[in-house]
Image (cartoon, grey):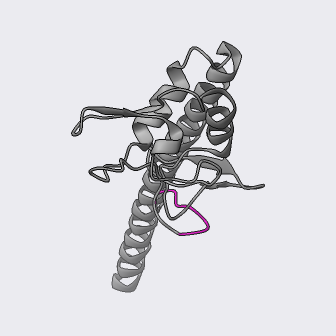
Amino acid sequence: MPAPKCPRCRRLFSPADTLEWDGYTLAHVDCGRPGSLSPEEHVFLYVYCWDHAVAECAPCAKRFRQGELAADPLSIRTYLCLDCHCDLTDSVRAHVLTCSTLPEQLRQRVREARDFGRRLLKRSHQLVDRADVLMRELESTFRELNDTRMRARRNRDRH
């Protein structure tokens, strides 16, 4: 059985991907950048974090406000350091999860949404693995049945 894939881009899901419920299935929020921030995370950053640093670039040892990053704050794009072009999306996401200006209830909802997506992904992997085991067992049972049928036919033909 194949591993779970995004129905839009057909790429395998990873735990770091940002997923959304697409009516009937999970899909990437942005197939071009599967690890991008969710639309809700973007809104929270815009509303609550516009006036302070939201990312830190380890290679440059600099902190950045949203307006100082190479990204449009209202689009679902990767956040880049202006100096070294390092992807700071994970740093921005970490900020959303820890920023004291965001109400705790909102931070908790962001955590719950990401955790829920990971749990769904893990469960789908488990179901795929279980289905694979069952398919192998079924194939083995059919082979045994076919072998038994062939032996019975040979025995009948000999007598």
Magenta stretch: residue 113 in it? no
Instruction: State the residue at coordinates (38%, 85%).
Output: 157
Please indicate whether residue 98 sits to the left or right of residue 75 in the image: left
Q: Nearer the viewer, residue 140 or 113?
A: 113
Image: 101 above or below 139: above
Q: Position of residue 20 (x, y in %)?
A: 66, 49
Image quadrant assignment for residue 43 = top right
Q: Nearer the viewer, residue 151 or 123?
A: 123
Q: Position of residue 96 (x, y in %)?
A: 55, 28
**Number of numbered discs:** 0
Q: Position of residue 95 (x, y in %)?
A: 48, 27
Please indicate whether residue 24 sits to the left or right of residue 122 in the image: right
Which range is magenta?
3-9
Q: Nearer the viewer, residue 117 or 79?
A: 79
Image: 102 above or below 93: above
Instruction: State the residue at coordinates (39%, 68%).
Output: 143
Image: 20 above or below 52: below
Instruction: State the residue at coordinates (25%, 32%).
Output: 61
Q: Nearer the viewer, residue 157 or 116?
A: 116
Q: Position of residue 146 (x, y in %)?
A: 43, 72
Instruction: State the residue at coordinates (32%, 53%).
Output: 85
Q: From the image, which quarter does the C terminus lie in?
A: bottom left
